[in-house]
Structure formats: C-alpha cells, structure tokens
Amino acid sequence: MKARDEQRLVERSIPGMNRGTRFAEVQHAEHAGATLKRIAAYFSHEKTMVVCMLAVVVFGTICGVWAPSLQSKAIDIIAGKEAGNFLKTLAFMLAVYLLYSVSQLVQGFCSANLSQRIVKRMREELFAKLVDLPIRYMDTHSHGDVMSRMTNDIENISTTVSQSLPSLFSGVLTIIGTAAVMLWYCWQLALLSFATVLLTVLATKTLSSRVRKFSRERQRLLGRLNGTVEEMISGYRTVVAYNHQELTTEEFCNTADSLTRAGIKTEIYSGVMGPIMNCIGNIGFVIIAAFGGYFSVHGRISVGVISAFIVYAKQFSRPINEIAQVYGQLQTAIAGAERVFMVLDEENEEKSGEPFGEGECAEITFQNVRFSYEAEHPIIRNFSFTVPFGKKVALVGATGSGKSTIVNLLMRFYDIDEGKILINGQDIKTISRDSLRRNVAIVLQDTVLFSDTIRNNLKYGNEAATEEQLAKAVEMSHCKEMIEALPQGLDFPLTGSGENISQGQRQMLAIARAFVADPKILILDEATSNVDTRTEKAVQDAMQQVMKNRTSIVIAHRLSTIRDSDLIVVMDHGRIVESGSHSSLLAQKGRYYELYMTQYAGFAT
C-alpha cells in the first residue's frame, strides 16, 4: 500500500480535516491575556528599539498637541488680543510642525524595524519547531493550516506591530493631551465638543462590526475560490478528460458571485465610514463655531482659541477612530499569535537515545508488534518476522494491508503500541532517531526532490559523498545518460521540486540518492513504479548489486519486481498470512498465488 493510502486512514479519523485548506478564518483568541504576555516576551528582546519607538511617539504627540496652541497664539497676535512677535511665533510653529513630521517618519522606521525583528525571531522559532515535530503531527494537521500559521498569522502580527501598536500608543497619548489642553482653554466648550465623540464611537462600533463580518465572509469565500482554481490547475487533465469544464466553471462562478456580493458589502460599509465620520466632525465644527462665537463675544475665549479648538476637535476624534480599527487588528493578531504558540507548545520529537550499533550489516526482528493510529483500531496485529543479515525481504498485499506502516514503524516515524522491533538485538526504542535514520535509506513511490542542483539532491543523505561515490551511484541507478544530456550535468538546477524533469527521472534520482547515502538498511517502497519496463529491469539489476551484503525491505504491488527476494511476506489487515520464496508460495496456491494470478493470468479474486 502506498504511504498516502494509509495516511488517508488517519485523515478520515479527524473530523473536518481537509488538506486542501489554504485559508483559516481567524476568530477571537481564547486566551488573550496569556497570549499577550507571551507576545510581550518578544518585545523584551528588543528593549532598545521599544524605548526608542516610545520616545519618538511621546515626542511626536507633544508636538502634535502643542502646534495648535501656537496657531492660536499667532491668530490672537494678529487680532491684537495678545502681545508677541508674530514672525517668531510663526517660525516656531513651523518648526514644531516639521519636528512632528520628522517624528512620524522616525516612528515608521522604528516600528517597521521592531516588527521585522520580532517576526524574524518568531518565524525562526516556528520553523525550527516544525522541523522537530513528530511525523504524527504533520499527518494529523492540514498542511495548508500549518503553512497559514507560518505565513498569514505571522504576517498579521507583523502588520499589527508595525502599524497598529504605534497608532494605539500615539492615539491614547493624543486623546489625553488634547483633552487636557481643551479643558484648560475652556472646559465648557470642551465638554460640548466631547459630545460628538459619543456619536463617533457609536458609528464606529456599528460600522466596524459590519465590516468585520463581511470581511471574514469575503476571506472564507476567497479561500474557497483559490481552492477551486488550485484543484482545476493541478487536476486539469482529469477535468478535461471527464468533460467537467462547464461544471467547474459553474462552481467557480457561483463562488465568485458570492465573493463579489461579500466584497461589495465590505467596501460599502468601509466606504461610508469616512463620510459619516466627516459628517460627525462637521457637526462638531458647527458646535465649536456657534458656542465658541458666543463665548468669544462674552469675552471668555479669544478667536485664536476657537481656531485651536477646531483643530483639537479633529485631533481628538481621529485617534478614537484609529483605536476602534486597531482593536479589530489586535484581535486578529492575538488570535494568530495564539495559533502560532499552539504549534510552539507541541512536544518535539524525542531525539535522545543510544547510537546505532556497529556492524557491517543489520538483522531486523519484529516481535509481536501491535500498532494503531487510533486506539481500539489496530492497523498492525501480532506481527512477527525476521529480516536476516544482508537479505532482501519483500512485503506484498492488498492496499490497506499495512505494508507502508511497517516501514513507518521501522523508521520510528511512529512508535509501536506493543511488542519490539530489534536491529542486531538492539531495541530501536533505545536508539536515537537521528542515529537510526542515518543508517536507513528509503525510496518512496511519491518522489520528493528539492529546488536545488541534482548534485545537492544526491548528497542530501550524505553531504560528505565524494565525486567518485556520486559517479558510481549515478551509473548504478542508470541516471548517467539522463544527467549527461542535461545542460549542466550534475549542476543542473531542479525547479519546482523537480518539475522540469519527468516523473520517471525523478524516481531514478531518488534511487541514486539512496545509493549515495550508503545505508546499512535499504527500504524501497514501490521505488520503480514510475519508470518504464526497460528502465525498471535495468534498475532492478543495478539494485541487486547495491543490495548485496545489505539488509533490504521492498514493498511492491508488481510482483515481477520481487520474484528474486530471499523472503516474501504476504500481509492482510496487519497480519502475516503467508511467507516464503516466490516458488514455494505459488505452490501453496494461497493468497500470494491469487495476487500473482490476478496480475499475470487475469483471474478474478
């Protein structure tokens, strides 16, 4: 059975699991307080930058609050209500506004620098965690969701740190400073001006909730739309072969229509927020003009103070709107950070243990092994057999019989529930995973190559490999002719994980990579399934030489590839039902005979 076939057994046991997921809808964090404390810990590593940013925010806020007062003084000097040098006051006011602008630039630089440093640290920690997580975690979590935590969630945190937090700090300080100055100038006019704030808060709360609602809907539909496009592109041949173009187009258009409606509603509510805020602001200006004129006529305030109040009223309402918007961004960032911390809190794969035993070759023994992906649903039951030194053992059986699971257990991708797996008498549970995997090479049916040169891909399991070892592996795996035909030979760059060469060529390179690793144990899981018959025969001949004096386990559906195996083990529902040589198993006319005749005589079973 292919590894992904057994993997589906795991996926089906997880409600709502979907590997096609690319966008996860972010909800409010469940533990916002604890998450904020952990985020604050990242700021503690950047104390200097945090202090600089806060200092710049405070300085900029002081300049922003002070400037309208200078404007008021200049107007009163012109009106003759106050003595002073007009040009000097004007120059001073210009300098304050320039300093305010400079502080905004420096604040942007500091916040961008701070956010990138924090995100870099968080991203490095998350990636380091991902490469140390157990295989079970990756098998039981949507790959799209894991990638979303690395990209979308961390990007939300970056945006919040670089934009939202400075706005929050400066907004709070501006509100406090502006309110204090307005109350100092004329508390009656200040209280009248504050009345419009209630309208601002009410309008912002109502509109923001609508915007968030339709934004989430738009994001969800965008994820579905991208999923449809991705499936159509990746499965284009299948779509065309089954004439599903119209159905696929209809599905796309239905989702696109829903996305358009959600987008229109989002843009409408986002768009009307500005005009409504301006309307409320104009109401505030009318209040200030009317009552300010009244107070000015009665000598309570000057004309300059009225002009300052108009600026302060706008300056007072603007941060309130920003804080309302920042609140939503903070909730999204905290929820994203919580998802990131959930991964960071997962237990790493246990790496401790003894080194792999010395010796030229390895004998593998399975003793009463029992294993289940889910409790009470065993995949492997009472499994016992031995792979002798330097022998080739083949595992055969129908899809779902547990062949690839045996490989997963031997590699310690999963630990067994009961029994023992011994290598030269050494329990693999006592061997460190790193040491074990350095001595085992595996070639899977689903070839994985990396976007790098062929040379570096071949040396992936043995970085110290010499040119002679590479040349020998290339020749034995029958890759020499193919590599020599490429423009740069071994230095030819593979793109898109090897998409610029054929699937068969990728499979042959994977076999060559296993040869370069020079392991004590070699595992071939349908390793020649994607090469043509002629190449398969050549590779089989080469593998016979490579497998000499090396313990080998071969998983195959095509029984022609394992006729010469020293031992063939027939599995069914996690148990061994037959074992023996090719000829002896055919003579028994049991399960192996049925499989063989199905492939080569066309008999139904």
Image (tube, rainbow, N blue to C red):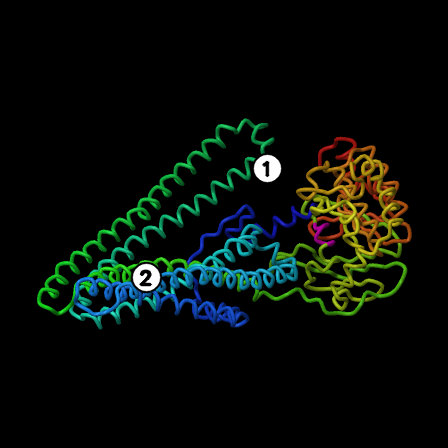
> Is 311 left or right of 297, judged from the image as shown?
right
The tag earlier along the polypeptide, 1 or 2, is: 1
Residue 198 in view in this figure: no
Q: Which residue is mark 1?
A: 234
Question: Identity of the amino acid at label 1?
Answer: Ser
Which residue is farthest left? 298
**Extent of the magenta region:** 402-407
Name the one closer to the observer, 457 or 369.
457
Is 261 included in the stretch rendered in magenta?
Answer: no
Determine the secondary structure under disc 2: helix
Magenta stretch, overall SS: helix
| Placement of the N terminus among the 4 image quadrants | top right
> Looking at the picture, does residue 514 appear above or below residue 366?
above
Where residue 423 appears, as percent x and y from the top left, is 82, 62
| Placement of the C terminus among the 4 image quadrants | top right
Q: CA distance from mark 1 to mark 2?
A: 47 Å
Q: Residue at x 15, y 68 (%)?
A: 301
